[in-house]
Amino acid sequence: MRGDIIKLAELRDSPLSVAEVTEAVMDPAAGGVAVFAGAVRDNDHGAAVTALSYSAHPTAAAELRKVAERVAAQFDAHAIAAVHRVGDLAIGDLAVVVAVSTRHRAEAFAACRMLIDDLKAGVPIWKHQHFATGVSEWVLPGGEAERVGGPGGPGGGTERSGAPGEPGGLPVTA
């Protein structure tokens, strides 16, 4: 694997750019460039989302790079880039942008799919979303969600036990 394949593997507390990530993977030998951009939506579970933030474990950037390295090892990629936001985001903000360039489109799509799926499943980044109902929810890597507060919250809900940041516990917000 060439060391220069991974062009971006970063966490940022500033707005993301699809153009920057796409430009990072452009290569004259690549016939396929696949890009995925994930945006903050105004609803989840059929309820209105009023606020959202992302927190990351100190190892998250290194884990993101490992995901990109696994994609590079599995596919004949020309270039790979992945950037994820942390901090407070507004509805419509980009939360994640990933891109892969390869010789052909089918491989670009497959590599891009693996990149975003493995990032979401394994990089220790936690989403904390607040709903108009008063409930807030932590969404952990892999998509597991835990609701806190409001109806179904403390005293009658599904709060996790354990200390924040510990196995079985809620993540710590920065």
Image: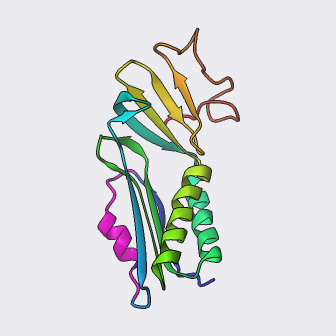
Asked if residue 108 is positioned above or below residue 166 in the image, the reply reads: below
Left or right of residue 68, residue 82 in this image = left
Q: Position of residue 113 (x, y in %)?
A: 52, 63
3 or 98: nearer the viewer: 98
Q: Quadrant of residue 135?
A: top left
Instruction: Name the quadrant containing residue 16.
Output: bottom left
- Rendered view: 111 above or below 11: below
Q: Residue furthest bottom?
A: 29
Q: Which residues are magenta?
A: 13-27
Residue 119 figure quarter: bottom right
Q: Is residue 7 visible?
A: no
Residue depicted at x 38% and y 68%: 21
Q: Residue at x 60, y 21 (%)?
A: 159
Colouring scheme, one of rainbow, by chain, secondary structure, one colour:
rainbow
Q: Magenta stretch: residue 24 in it?
A: yes
Is residue 138 depicted above or below 86 in this figure?
Answer: above
Q: How many numbered discs sit on the rendered protein?
A: 0
